[in-house]
Amino acid sequence: MNDGLATLNQEYLIGYCLANTDPVRFHSNHYPFLIPYSFTLNADNKTVKSFTGFVFEEDDSFEQSELSVNQTELNSICYEMKKIARIQFREYGDSDERSGEIDDLNSSNKRKIFELFNKALPMLSREPFTHYLFTYGMRNIQKRPMKKDMQVARFSGEVPSLNFLLSDKGDYYELKLRFKVKEKVLHFCEDRIAMFFICSSANPTVWYLLECETDSRVVLFFSRKNFKIQIPKGYYKEHFEPYVDEIKKQYELEIR
């Protein structure tokens, strides 16, 4: 726990949750966003006893004086995120113009949310109670969070850098995506990808915010391949080497 514990208002306890879902598989899909929650503490004053509810802008009953300056600013960012987090989908029969408008709106909202995460991260990392929730869709964020679904999370201020490893495996080459934090190579935790955020398999409770949107697209692509691609040597020179050359221009590539 961090220093925020010392200044907790025991009557008005607020924490922050990274709400995430698979942007492809579920109804009422959404981009990752932050949402405040209220809770009660166990007798140790260090762990959550129960979650009493999500905090929504329209029924936010907390007075400004009850929150820290950090929480007041964070809440404002959370409410802004939620307004634009829902992913819009094309309907059957939509014109090309309408389809283009929907794509543009989604891209714009995604970009704004990434900017808001960058703004929120320093404040979020100072909060003593933060969690992660896989929502299975926006429609499930209604009332009180289920304790069994809320996973303890910590948000690091360190910026991860993507790192590729190209290995000779005999009959084929293998291109693997990893990431580095403070020059230490880490492997992805495959079920802890929240578009702009990643975790390592070594410590899946610590979340890192990627440096840019492009990194998030690279991570999404490789996550669908278990973070490695295998290429038969007969195909490598003609079909894959140009791709590796492009990677080298943007990211660190180790060859073994």
Image (cartoon, rainbow, N blue to C red):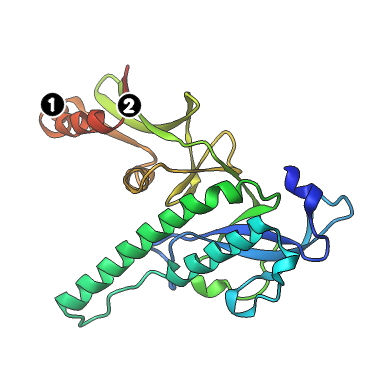
Which residue is at 30% across, 31% downward?
A: 251
In the picture, the disc for residue 83 is none
Which residue is at 27% across, 79% downward?
A: 91
The location of residue 188, given as percent across then percent down, is: 47, 38
Residue type highlighted by circle 1: Lys
Residue type highlighted by circle 2: Glu
**Left or right: 168 with respect to 57?**
left
Q: Quadrant of residue 96?
A: bottom left
The location of residue 17, given as percent across then percent down, is: 60, 58
The location of residue 175, given as percent across then percent down, is: 30, 30
Residue bearing the label numbered 1: 237
The location of residue 239, given as percent across then percent down, is: 13, 34
Q: Earlier in the sequence, mark 2 or mark 1?
A: 1
Q: Nearer the viewer, residue 42 or 74?
A: 74
Viewer can see residue 149: no
Residue bearing the label numbered 2: 252
Q: Quadrant of residue 101?
A: bottom left
* Residue that sits furthest to the bottom in the current view: 93
Viewer can see residue 105: yes
Q: Quadrant of the C terminus?
A: top left
- Helix, strand or loop status at disc 2: strand
Q: Residues within 10 Å of mark 1 (few under 14, many from 20)?
A: few
Gap between marks 2 and 1, in whole Å?
20 Å
